[in-house]
Amino acid sequence: MEIAPKSEGDHIAAARAALISAALPHVAFDGWSRRTLDAAIADSGVDRGLAALAFPRGGVDMALGFHRMMDVRLADELSRVELSRMKVRERVTFAVRRRIELVEGQRDAVRRGATLLALPIHARDSAAAIWGTADLIWKLCGDTSTDYNWYSKRAILASVYSATVLYWLGDESAGSQNTWGFLDRRIDNVMSFEKLKAQAQANPLARAAFWLPGQVLGRIRAPRGAGGSGGA
């Protein structure tokens, strides 16, 4: 059986993975920076021209690449877990917790990435990265919504995820138990909101009051293919 030759995209993807792996020991000292990228190039042996294609903006693209790499790892891991046996709340909680546990040994990398992406110039990249993680988690949990619920679910989960990560970065409790308690409380809030929304839909007066907003929001549809299977 013939093995298809690697495409340029394959080479770039391999370079990204090698550079991020080589960069991690340097991030704690130099952050996600051009200096860290230079060190990663030297340590990994990746061609400098290929590195420029992999991370054209240098450090910020490396930080985003690390984030996406962990999303891919989460998708791979959860594909082997029978999430269908869990309630929706349990699925979402489990997925968020696992996503954070995947970077347990890389707090400095996460902290440095959060600091860099908090800069106004990177606000759009930061929001897109968090939204992508929230979208992935909902897909992995079996969400098939296509109307405005597609957006509201992801917006709420993005807020929960980012708040939990920030809490985790400062958590010194054994096994990050305080973080998981914080996550449970945030998920409780989400479930309470969903319950309230369902009750409003069942109440004739509330349904009448929200008829017009519902008509407007009901025209919103998720992007094409958003209801499909999980992926990074």
Image (spheres, rainbow, N blue to C red):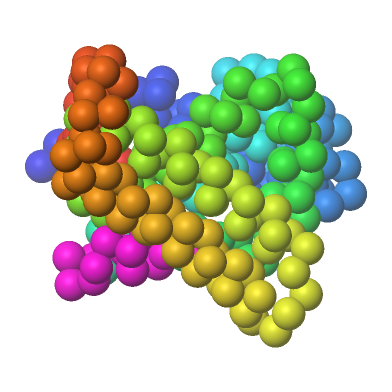
Residue at far front of view:
205
In the image, residue 108 above or below residue 203:
below
Residue 218, picture quadrant: top left
User: Which quadrant: the N terminus?
Assistant: top left
In the foreground, 133 or 90: 90
Task: Say left or right for 123 vs 144.
Answer: right
Q: Position of residue 223 (x, y in %)?
A: 27, 21
In the foreground, 59 or 141: 141
The answer to if 94 sits in the magenta stretch is yes
Task: Say left or right for 152 vs 201.
Answer: right
In the foreground, 63 or 130: 130
Q: Position of residue 103 (x, y in %)?
A: 60, 60
| Point 89% across, 49% down: residue | 29
Count of marks, rendered view? 0
Residue at far bottom of view:
174
Does residue 210 appear in the picture of this structure? yes
Specify start and end residues of the magenta stretch as a single range. 82-97
Q: Position of residue 33 (x, y in %)?
A: 81, 32
Q: Main secondary structure of the magenta part?
A: helix
Residue at far right of view:
29
The answer to if 71 sits in the magenta stretch is no
| Point 78% across, 45% down: residue | 112
In the image, residue 146 above or below residue 179:
above
Q: Position of residue 201 (x, y in %)?
A: 21, 42
Does residue 17 appear in the picture of this structure? no
User: Which quadrant: the C terminus?
Assistant: top left
| Point 70% across, 22% down: residue | 122
In the image, residue 77 above or below residue 202:
below
| Point 41% across, 21% down: residue | 8
